[in-house]
Image: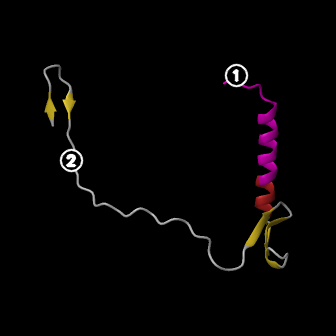
Amino acid sequence: MSRDAGGTWYASVCFQRTATPAPRAYRRPAGAAVGVDVGVKTAAVVATAAGTLVATLEASGALRDALSHLGHLQRALSRTQKGLR
């Protein structure tokens, strides 16, 4: 730490860091692909590319309420005039 004639303090920080190797390129995993559909009635549906249903996650009341509230906020935002704030 040092201080100049004007009273301003300065600090110098030195550190060492070990080099990490660059990440490898992404490779698509071998195996069947699945798709996830997110909705309101059911939270998520997982199905294969052939359309075979793998899993269904039921929506909770809290999720429905939160999505309803989010829709209300998005509609209110869309009605606001751009550039006022």
46 left or right of 4? right
Q: Main secondary structure of the magenta part?
A: helix
Q: Position of residue 67 (x, y in %)?
A: 79, 53
Q: Nearer the viewer, residue 14 or 70?
A: 14
- Could you say which disc has been placed on residue 35 in the image? none
Q: How is the protein colored in the picture? A: secondary structure
Q: Nearer the viewer, residue 9 or 17?
A: 17
Q: Nearer the viewer, residue 11 or 72?
A: 11
Q: Position of residue 59 (x, y in %)?
A: 80, 66
N-terminal-most mark, 2 or 1: 2
State the CA–CA distance, disc 2 to disc 1.
46 Å
Q: Nearer the viewer, residue 48 or 54?
A: 48
Quarter occupied by the C terminus: top right
Q: Position of residue 37 (x, y in %)?
A: 79, 65
Give the residue drawn at x 81%, y 58%.
64
Residue at the farthest top position: 6
Q: Amino acid at mark 1?
A: Leu
Q: In the picture, residue 80 is in which quadrant?
A: top right
The residue labelled by disc 1 is 84
Give the residue drawn at x 58%, y 70%.
27
Q: In the rendered view, would you say 22 is above or below 2?
A: below
Q: Secondary structure at mark 1?
A: loop
**Discs 2/1, front:** 2
Label 2 neighbour load within 10 Å: few <14, some 14-19, many 20+: few
Q: In the rendered view, would you say 9 is above or below 21?
A: above
Q: Secondary structure at mark 2?
A: loop
The residue labelled by disc 2 is 14
Quarter occupied by the N terminus: top left
Start and end of the magenta stretch? 67-85
Give the residue drawn at x 23%, y 51%.
15
